[in-house]
Amino acid sequence: MKKNSRPISVIVEKTNTGYSAFVEELNIFSTALTIPQLYENLLEALNLYFEDESREFTTADIQLKIDLQQFFKYYKVLNSKFLANRIGMNPTLLSQYVSGVKKPSQKQNQKIIDGIQMIGKELAELSLVL
């Protein structure tokens, strides 16, 4: 099996029936009701596409690109006010980014992504006491 050198960028959009995904550079499409199902469907599509090259893909090989509004609609466990406070951003400004009223600059976008990833890392490292 060949190792994949870089993650494949996948554009994700919300649809009336769930989510759609598009790998522009490869002309691969997929749909699903949820994000986890979308990962499964994308893996199947990618592995079929590269079947003759003996390449095997995992979720680590996929980088989903989703806009802020869809992110907060799907991951309701994280609210924009909490994130804004964690990253030192005005909550009203982040709310405007999330609602689509304003578009974040590249620097602000990176700050938001870094904050989300920091919270995700913290959650992944947690151990709950029962």
Image (tube, grey):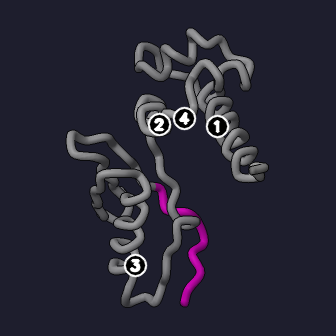
Q: Position of residue 52 (x, y in %)?
A: 37, 90
Q: Residues within 10 Å of mark 2 (few under 14, many from 20)?
A: some
Q: Nearer the viewer, mark 4 or mark 3?
A: 4
In-image side of 119 versus 64 (left or right): right
Q: Name the residue at 65% across, 23% down.
A: 82
Q: Position of residue 25 (x, y in %)?
A: 38, 61
Q: Mark 1 points at which residue?
A: 116
Q: Do the residues labelled 2 and 1 touch (CB within 8 Å)?
A: yes
Q: Nearer the viewer, mark 2 or mark 3?
A: 2
6 inside magenta stretch: yes
Upstream in sequence: badge 1 or badge 4? 4
Residue 126 makes an appearance in the image:
no
Q: Position of residue 20 (x, y in %)?
A: 29, 51
Of the 4 image quadrants, the one containing the N terminus is bottom right
Q: Mark 2 points at which residue?
A: 71
Q: What residue type is labelled 2?
A: Phe
Upstream in sequence: badge 2 or badge 3? 3
Pick the front one: 94 or 52: 94
The CA distance from mark 2 to mark 1 is 10 Å
Please, what secondary structure does the residue beneath circle 3 have? helix
Tag count in the figure?
4
Q: Name the residue at 38% across, 65% down.
A: 42
The span shown in magenta is: 1-9
Residue 108 vertical placement versus 5 (above, below): above
